[in-house]
Image (cartoon, grey):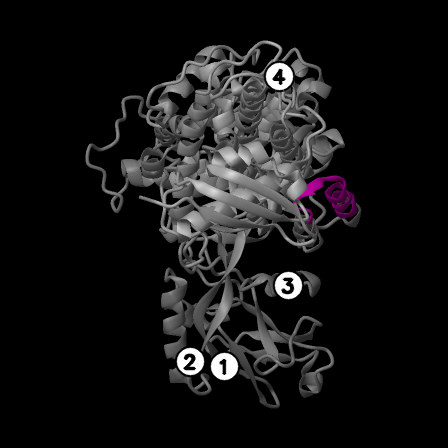
Amino acid sequence: MTEQPRTPNVPSKPSLDGLEEKWVRVWETEGTYRFDRTKARAEVYSIDTPPPTVSGSLHVGHVFSYTHTDTVARFQRMRGREVFYPMGWDDNGLPTERRVQNYFGVRCDPSLSYDPSFEPPEKPDPKRQLPVSRRNFIELCERLTEIDEKAFEEMWRRVGLSVDWNHLYTTIGDESRTASQRAFLRNLARGEAYMSEAPTLWDVTFRTAVAQAELEDREYPGAFYRLRFHGDERPVHIETTRPELLPACVAVVAHPDDERYQELFGTTVRTPLFGVEVPVVAHRLAEPGKGSGIAMICTFGDVNDVTWWRELDLPTRAIIDWDGRLVNEAPQGVPAHPYGELAGKTVFSAKERVVELLRDSGDLDGEPRKITRPVKFYEKGSKPLEIVTTRQWYIRNGGRDPETRAELLARGRELVWHPPYMRARYENWVEGLAGDWLISRQRFFGVPIPVWYRLDDAGEPVYDDPIIPAEDSLPVDPSSDVPPGYTEDQRGKANGFMADPDVMDTWATSSLSPQIAGGWERDADLFSRVFPFDLRPQAHDIIRTWLFSTVVRAHLEHGSLPWTDTALSGWILDPDRKKMSKSKGNVVTPIALLEEYGSDAVRYWAANGRPGTDTAFDTGQIKVGRRLAIKILNASKFVLGFGEVDSGAAVTEPLDLAMLAALGGVVDEATTAFEGYDYTRALERTERFFWEFCDDYLELVKTRAYGEGAEAQSARVALRTALSVMLRLFAPVLPYVTEEVWSWWREGSVHRASWPGAAELPSGGDPAVLAATAEALRQIRKAKSEAKVSMRADVTRAVVRGAEVRRVAGPDLVAAGRIADLSLEEEPVELTVHVTLAPTG
């Protein structure tokens, strides 16, 4: 597309109303943002766009961060790069399942058979959910996400994202499932994926394992209970917040240097209520200054219990089941009485009963001491996590391997961070890893773990020899597909097979977003033109999850980074300076804002949020953005209304050359800012110049521009040149108003026009000429304002004194100030103007 000027066709009453609908349609019809896949890799700029979670509606936080990415995409496109800017929908995982459960009033029961004629209740009751088969449940998930995805796409188009919608993917689609399963099988073949039965952080509400990256600490009320354990020589008092775990106690532990318990190490004590003999052991993690300095080790109360259990080789007495209730039968070695009173209770009810029994037995020393302490939660959960023993799949991520950890730290240093200080968050996360990446989830709507297990003569699974599918058969669903060499009637029978029941963590698929969007192993030609990608834009709070896991997968599979640069957006804060999120119920949806103020205004607010910086939601700034867009319309109409420009006309007048020289400095600053991913700085500098252009230069030059001759032509050429440049500088942030004005007098799209550069601006101008003349005009205006006369009032005489008077453009100042007699007197002082107003009436 070209950008040649033509005779302007300016509306009589320019308006922002309807621009979104108009230009979205044109952009789609003309393929303005369509990716040209014939370009060589060096000509391509590829973006690993975050796939938003499709579980409800977008909020202004999404508009905020995605606008940042779009400004970069538009800048790179105008710089001559062919921009690969795909979009994905993250539609698998817990948020989608929860939304489907509430929306349709159903819950998944894998034991049920598929009902091909099933329809959800007309009046669903979320509190009495109807059980359905896994396949029926997945069909409902797909039905609802399709509705949500259409709404998301409509919203993104209105916001003005310059996405190529031909490159749309979903994280539950065939291509994504194939890529996820292929990557997993290759991890497995290289020994990077493995299964292990071990203590696992567990959310009892969602009934699924939780990875380290999905944890968050929350302040939680509790109490310390001082319990009396019974020793042969003396009682031992232990303070605990979880007396309900007494049946799970396998030892008590103190620090090896704690003098109070030296004589107890190597002996045993008996647990209160249950009378179970447990050893007294020493370990460095015990805290002498906490409580009584000696703690009970239970399987499992917290992560310290897991460490003690593993390093001290202790037995297991697990009592908490997957549903968060105590198991029905007492662990081996624990008497059925009084355990029977606790069986089947929730941990809360069990705690209440244990405390009652301890009071009755005299083993509760004093009253509980109330406290508030940090407790680990699943980031999407509402109850504290438990630790249960489960069989799970893991991918090695350096958590247990110092060599891999060092390699991933090196990848972090190889990556270019915007802003640079965000790298420290990555390094702190990698250095603090306590284990490998747990990727299996006990859910239903997700990418299935692509393995089966042989069943032995007794019908027990042989876990250490999984059956894996061929890559060319992917994607597979082991719950309905049959492994090679078997038939369906052998499912679940001795000497037959069983499917792995789990799905992958949603991050296990999202971590492959560059591979999925780029056509890895599906479209080798496309992949060679876009990978490694140029940019990963994302929020700073998911460095530990999405960014790190994507680096892990690319490092293991390709031996490279997945992208060269990453740009981090901050959070949107509510008026109380709290993060805006659906879970907190403080989100603002964007549709009303877009309808009231227009997309450009909302984008203007978003672009004022600097990279990596949290930003408060502010309708005041949105209003400023709307005023700016309206001013661009009106100022552009004014500029294009001065008359035609003669062919061959040139910029010759000092004031015009000065303005364009100042604009050249703005172009340089904005370009440098965008190259450093500082879209905010680029906008600020452009906007400041634009208002100065309107307030000062337009006022100074308009009389001359309406005239005739070479001086008038110089003004008109300068005005149109400046307008062309400013529209292109604003275009990444304000796509609608700039496209509208561009269409009045230029061919093609401003978004396919070239980014402005110094070569297209005339040389020889002195910005100080504009600065000095504008300052003189401001002082003349001030004098008129103080005299309470019109800005059109005549000035009998104006005397300009100062060191810069030789730079003042006298004829233009005379015209703009309506000055009859102008005197310029050079003196070594700051510029001042003495004004004598013409007498009135």
Tell me, yes or no, whether the highlighted magenta stretch contains residue 411.
Answer: yes
Q: Amino acid at mark 3?
A: Trp
Q: Which mark is residue 358?
A: 2
Which of 369 and 598 lies nearest the eye of the viewer?
598
Crowd around label 2: few <14 · some 14–19 · many ≥20 (10 Å): some
Q: Is residue 286 above or below residue 619?
A: below
> Looking at the image, which residue is at 56% across and 18% down?
713
Q: Earlier in the sequence, mark 1 or mark 3?
A: 1
Residue corresponding to mark 1: 227
Tell whether label 2 touches label 1 (CB within 8 Å).
yes
Q: Work out whether 282 lies above or below 627.
A: below
Quadrant assignment, res 286: bottom right
Residue type indicated by callout 4: Arg
Regarding mark 2 in the picture, which secondary structure is present there?
Answer: helix
Which label's residue is closer to the chain start, 1 or 2? 1
Q: CA distance from mark 4 to mark 3?
A: 46 Å
